[in-house]
């Protein structure tokens, strides 16, 4: 048990109804025997966030998980921010300390690394990123620890290209940018990280090479994406969004509850079950 009576946590965001976080965290609580713990989801946007956080009693609340659009909006509300979160200006994990202080961390970056490590990927000579934005910056931060070579980001428009180059400079990653129209060229990289919304890479499925490297597609619903299915069809390794979600949630559970290791297998099984299509009913 934690050294205090706190036993509540939740995920915040907008939209939030689709979030799998409650499934994963509740499975962890069950496996750890934390029967008095609760994990909920709340629809909260940037405007409502300060008031929502201020109303939480740290004697009852252990922490929060944050999704878009709150990962940067929460930073001014915190007393401390980890170096990992500060490196990408994004917090997805808040912990309420017994003294009332609020600390922020980013478990997406170590979650990405853990998901890749689970598939035996600890170093790659070069990589490509499909897309830009918050997830792409986290991907760059992860690649800063396992890719000594160039990273090419395929993006739409000069503003996105400039943003990715700036993130590269900040994170110490050599980033080249290329136009989204040439995204098929990305598929020859040893590691391809797709950070785009659902459907955005479907047109690339037909361009998967005969012997591709590793694909890390951060989506988990719908799964598999057309690109992931084509990649797996070539017999090449695919790391999916559920892998990332589970690994980052493991770290959140450990920070919120003070219990480690969190039950990775139980959490993954719960996530897989939640994503499994429902069996058709008998007529």
Image: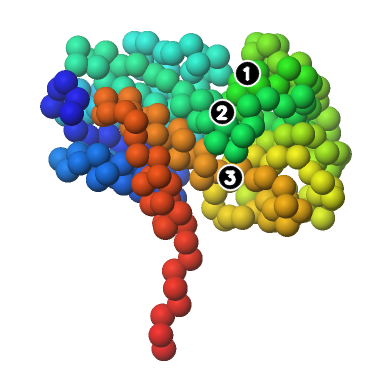
Q: Residue furthest front?
A: 120
Q: Quadrant of the N terminus?
A: top left
In the rendering, which numbered label is found on residue 240?
Answer: 3
Residue 4 at what x, y percent from top left?
Answer: 15, 22
Residue holding disc 1? 145
Q: Quadrant of residue 279?
A: bottom left
Dots 2, 3 in contact, CB < 8 A: no
Residue 129 at what x, y percent from top left?
Answer: 72, 32
Which residue appears at 57% of the width and 31% of the height?
117
Residue 93 at what x, y percent from top left?
Answer: 39, 26
Q: Quadrant of the C terminus?
A: bottom left
Which residue appears at 48% of the width and 40% of the height?
245
> How far apart, in angstroms, are the residues tagged by discs 3 and 1?
20 Å
Label 2, residues with CA under 10 Å away: few <14, some 14-19, many ≥20: many
Q: Is residue 183 visible?
A: no
The reply, left or right, for residue 200 in relation to residue 271 is right
């Amino acid at each position: 048990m934690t050294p205090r009576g706190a036993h509540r946590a939740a995920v915040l965001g907008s939209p939030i109804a689709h979030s799998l976080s409650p499934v994963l965290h509740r499975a962890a609580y069950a496996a750890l025997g934390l029967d008095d713990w609760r994990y909920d989801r709340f629809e909260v946007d940037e405007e409502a966030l300060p008031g929502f956080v201020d109303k939480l009693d740290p004697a009852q609340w252990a922490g929060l998980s944050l999704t878009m659009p709150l990962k940067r909006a929460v930073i001014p509300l915190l007393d401390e921010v980890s170096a990992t979160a500060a490196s990408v200006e994004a917090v997805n994990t808040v912990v309420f300390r017994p003294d009332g202080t609020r600390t922020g961390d980013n478990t997406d970056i170590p979650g990405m690394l853990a998901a890749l490590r689970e598939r035996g990927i600890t170093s790659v000579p070069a990589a490509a990123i499909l897309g830009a934005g918050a997830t792409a910056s986290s991907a760059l931060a992860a690649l800063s620890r396992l890719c000594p070579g160039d990273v090419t980001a395929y993006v739409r428009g000069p503003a996105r290209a400039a943003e990715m180059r700036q993130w590269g400079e900040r994170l110490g990653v050599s980033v080249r940018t290329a136009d989204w129209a040439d995204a098929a060229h990305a598929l020859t990289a040893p590691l391809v990280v797709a950070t785009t919304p659902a459907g955005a890479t479907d047109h690339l499925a037909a361009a998967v090479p005969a012997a591709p490297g590793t694909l890390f597609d951060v989506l988990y619903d719908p799964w598999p994406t057309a690109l992931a299915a084509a990649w797996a069809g070539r017999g090449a390794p695919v790391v999916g969004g559920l892998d990332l979600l589970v690994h980052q949630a493991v770290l959140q559970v450990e920070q919120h509850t003070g219990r480690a290791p969190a039950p990775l297998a139980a959490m993954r099984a719960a996530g897989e079950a939640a994503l499994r299509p429902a069996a058709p009913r008998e007529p």
